[in-house]
Image (cartoon, rainbow, N blue to C red):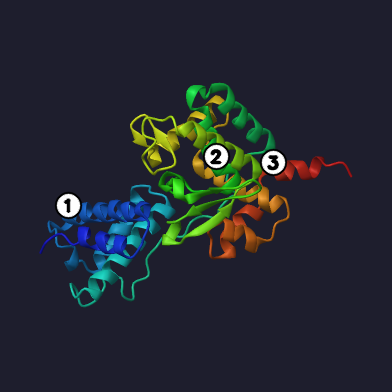
Amino acid sequence: MPDPIPTFLADLENEGVSPHTVRAYGADLRAWARWYDQTTGSQALTAADPRDIRDYQGTMVRQGLKPATINRRLNAMRRFYKWAVRKGLIDESPFEGLRVGVKAQKQAAPKWLTEKEQRRLLRAVREYGKKDWVRDMAIIRLGLDAGLRLSEMAALTLDDVELNARSGWVRVRYGKGGKAREVPLSLDARKALAAWLEARERHPYADDPHLFLGQRGPLSDAGIYRIVTKYGRLAGIEGLTPHTLRHTFAKNLIDAGEPLTVVAALMGHESLNTLAIYTRPSREDLARAVNRDL
């Protein structure tokens, strides 16, 4: 039987699943396929049974993979086998009636930037960005002021940005789970994007529809990640990633008293439970509480 994974991934694309999610599913399923081949001597994933699933989970635990990684891989596999049943490749999913998954430890408050760190980061872009600082400022602002995910920023096109005299919006066409949303832009974000759009007109790849361009064309996820982490180092902010900027966006909104329903919509979250991590106080919040003048 031909490898069913490419057909499964193609069907996901046709369903409108984001390219980032499709790539992640592909990587997770190929990891499962390698393990299955090495363990059973068979490449026929459709022959897997519940015992194979449990054994694979045990292997991942022994390898020290994070619970989130293990659960993500199992979810990709579960969806693959549900698809295989619909396609008539198998009669029953090996996940049928099977309870698998790793319970994560209680999640600590995520890393977000303090106001002082946000100012340091923006200053680092202006001071060290050289000829690319205008583009890089637009990237940082979309993370801090719009909460876009890394893959969402990389997928943006010129048509996804709407700038007016007193307002602006960015359209996320393929958010997590294939869900689209629109996010309003702050004044600072509008200024940063307007400056980049003006500079972008002189770029060698200006005819490309992607919003963010590098030396060889559109910036990839990895390219944007490197830009953000570079400024984190220059600003002396350890472990800064694009997701840190997204966490900071959410934290700023919650600290400003915005309703959780509004924050969830802006972040692209369906469940308010997802926002609970942002209401959990960080070490900085606790220190500020006990040092506040009464």
Residue at image position (66%, 32%) is 119
Q: Residues within 10 Å of mark 3 (few under 14, many from 20)?
A: few
Q: Position of residue 265 (x, y in %)?
A: 58, 61
User: What label does residue 193 carry, if any?
Assistant: 2
Taking the view exactly as shown, the residue that stands out farthest to the right is: 294
Q: Amino acid at mark 2?
A: Leu
Q: Position of residue 5 (x, y in %)?
A: 22, 59
> Is disc 1 in contact with disc 3, using a CB cutoff of under 8 Å?
no
For badge 3, the amino acid type reads Glu
94 or 127, nearer to the observer: 127
Task: Please tell me how crowded label 2 is: few (under 14), some (14-19), or many (20+) other residues with Cα within 10 Å.
Answer: many
Q: Position of residue 83 (x, y in %)?
A: 27, 70
Callout 1–callout 2 Cβ contact below 8 Å: no
- At mark 1, the secondary structure is helix
Image quadrant for the N terminus?
Answer: bottom left
Q: Mark 2 vs mark 3: which is more N-terminal?
A: 2
Q: Which mark is residue 13?
A: none
Find the distance from the CA under tag 2 to the CA under tag 3. Answer: 31 Å
Whether residue 246 is visible, yes or no, is yes
User: Where does label 3 land, which residue?
Assistant: 284
Q: Is residue 224 left or right of residue 24?
A: right
Q: Which residue is mark 1?
A: 38
Camera-side mark, 1 or 3: 3
